[in-house]
Amino acid sequence: MDRTAPREPLLRIDGVTVRFGGIVALDGVSFHVERGQVCGLIGPNGAGKSTLFNCLSGLYPWQAGAIEFNGHSLARLSSHRRAALGLGRTFQNLALFGSMSARENVLVGTYAHHHAGFLLDAIGGRRTRKVEREAAERADAAIELLSLQAVADRCVAALPFGTQKRVEMARALACEPSLLLLDEPACGLNHEELESLGELIVSLRDKLSLAVLLVEHHMGLVMGISDKVVALNFGRRIAEGTPEQVRCHPDVITAYLGEQVHGETDGQAA
Ligand SMILES: Nc1ncnc2c1ncn2[C@@H]1O[C@H](COP(=O)(O)OP(=O)(O)OP(=O)(O)O)[C@@H](O)[C@H]1O
């Protein structure tokens, strides 16, 4: 795929502002993510990255601006509807069910596609069995994608941290997202796990035409695998461009050095 050719954006973030009392966590942030694109989202602590993720996954409302995913406004959509539309996410702190097996955790991710409803589930029947079979197939496909077959039936709490992270990613993929939100996936991984994580994200992008919005403090990973990078500081977008353009952007360098940012800085890195 030619990643330099302009394509229809999958995710449009347009002038989004979020305030918590007197704190402006996001201040008119705009950028978009295209299908099959890895977009890195960087910024120092408190820049607004998690706030934006929480807006995307339905945990936080925003006071101004618009977010559109796959042609749908996200403003009034429940988290469940967002998942059904193709928005998947993982969490900074793992959100797995420790006493359940890896496979059972992944099965939970298929819920977004589960249309049978409570009553039909209770009654059972052919339709419910079909839904369950399809859910199991989707879970198995996600388990295979993440090479988790050998540990699928083991209790998730007994698995190494890096493997648990892959289980969480498999669960997000089981709802067959077109955009995956990854919140600090490198956190707590060793060097070897980090390398395979980078390869994994790129291979998912290529195999599934998956778009990924990657919030990550590990600069090596972000700069190594992102097709484009957006940098935030104090809730504002300070740079957007290729990894190289953003790495060299003076406002990004200043933000990471912890110095005062002067004047208007909302620009496209060139
Ligand atoms: N629920 C909340 N209530 C009040 N203030 C909040 C809330 N969530 C975030 N903030 C504030 O909004 C600003 C942006 O925080 P956010 O967590 O989005 O930054 P971040 O870039 O994700 O930081 P980090 O890299 O440390 O996770 C910070 O000043 C933070 O204190």
Image: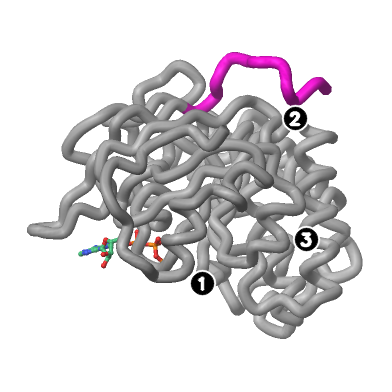
Q: Measuring 53% from the left and 37% from the top, which residue is drawn there?
A: 269
Which amino acid, by three-letter code, is at mark 1?
A: Asn
- Where disc 3 sits, the SS reads helix
Q: Quadrant of the N terminus?
A: top right
Q: Is residue 169 above or below residue 40?
A: below
Residue 15 in the image, given as x and y percentages of width and height: 29, 31
Q: Taken as a whole, is the magenta stretch helix, strand or loop? A: loop
* Contact check, label 3 and label 2, Cβ < 8 Å: no
The residue carrying mark 3 has its beta carbon less than 8 Å from ligand 1: no
| Ligand 1 image-quadrant field | bottom left
Residue 200 in the image, given as x and y percentages of width and height: 81, 53
Residue 22 in the image, given as x and y percentages of width and height: 9, 58
Which amino acid, by three-letter code, is at mark 3?
A: Leu
- Is any atom of residue 98 visible in this view? yes
Q: Examine the structure image and report whether residue 118 is included in the region drawn in magenta.
A: no
Residue 246 in the image, given as x and y percentages of width and height: 58, 46
- Where disc 2 sits, the SS reads loop
Report the disc number at residue 209.
Answer: 2
Q: Which residues are magenta?
A: 1-11
Q: Measuring 34% from the left and 38% from the top, which residue is drawn there?
A: 29
- Earlier sequence position, callout 1 versus callout 3: 1
Report the disc number at residue 197.
Answer: 3
Q: Measuring 77% from the left and 68% from the top, which residue is drawn there?
A: 194
Structural distance between the alpha carbons of marks 3 and 2? 17 Å
